[in-house]
Amino acid sequence: MADTEQAEESTPPPATEAVRDARAERRAARLAKQINAFARSHGGSAEGQLAHIGRGSVRIALVGANGEWGTLVAPSHESAQRAVELSGLTVHEDFSGEFAAKVRTGPYEWSRMAGIQLGGPSNP
């Protein structure tokens, strides 16, 4: 019976709502810091768009002032939304029109999109 008591004592208590909220806030703050770093290194500002990518995850697509682009993944829509608020990122509803026209693609992207048709690397 002593073994059973010892095993029960070693299991951690479930996370409280306050602990979950604090973790979510830290996660959002880390994402906001990454968004701001991206903006600083790509022309001083950036714009973005949020897109659900499955299992609750959200992609934050970023486009810098210089046309360079990148993505971050947030574990939830709430986390992504909070990160965007903390960073002050301008968010677009969709990735089209004027916003999409700001993206600058290079030779690598064109060869990946075209694949073997233009002598680029084939898609796996």
Image (spheres, helix red, strand yellow):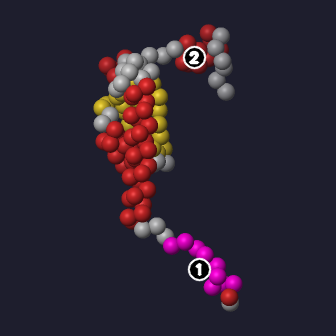
Q: Magenta stretch: dominant SS?
A: helix
Which residue is rendered at x = 38% and y = 37% of the image? 50
Which residue is rendered at x = 62% and y = 11% of the image? 117
Q: Which mark is residue 88?
A: none
Which residue is rendered at x = 34% and y = 26% of the image? 45
Which residue is rendered at x = 42% and y = 68% of the image? 16
Quadrant of the image containing the N terminus = bottom right
Mark 1 or mark 2, whichever is nearer to me = 1
Q: Earlier in the sequence, mark 1 or mark 2?
A: 1
**Residue 93, can we see it?**
no
Q: In the image, residue 82 lies at what x, y percent?
A: 34, 46
Q: Residues within 10 Å of mark 1 (few under 14, many from 20)?
A: few
Point out the stretch of residues depicted in magenta. 3-13
Q: In the image, residue 20 lies at what x, y percent?
A: 42, 61
Q: Quadrant of residue 102?
A: top left
Amino acid carrying label 1: it is Glu
**Residue 82, can we see it?**
yes
Q: In the image, residue 104 lies at what x, y percent?
A: 44, 16
Q: Residue furthest bottom?
A: 1
Secondary structure under the numbered disc 2 in the rendered image: helix
Q: Is residue 124 left or right of residue 75?
A: right
Residue at which label 1 appears = 9
Q: In the image, residue 60 lies at what x, y percent?
A: 42, 36
Residue at which label 2 appears = 108
Judge whether residue 6 is colored magenta.
yes
Amino acid carrying label 2: it is Tyr
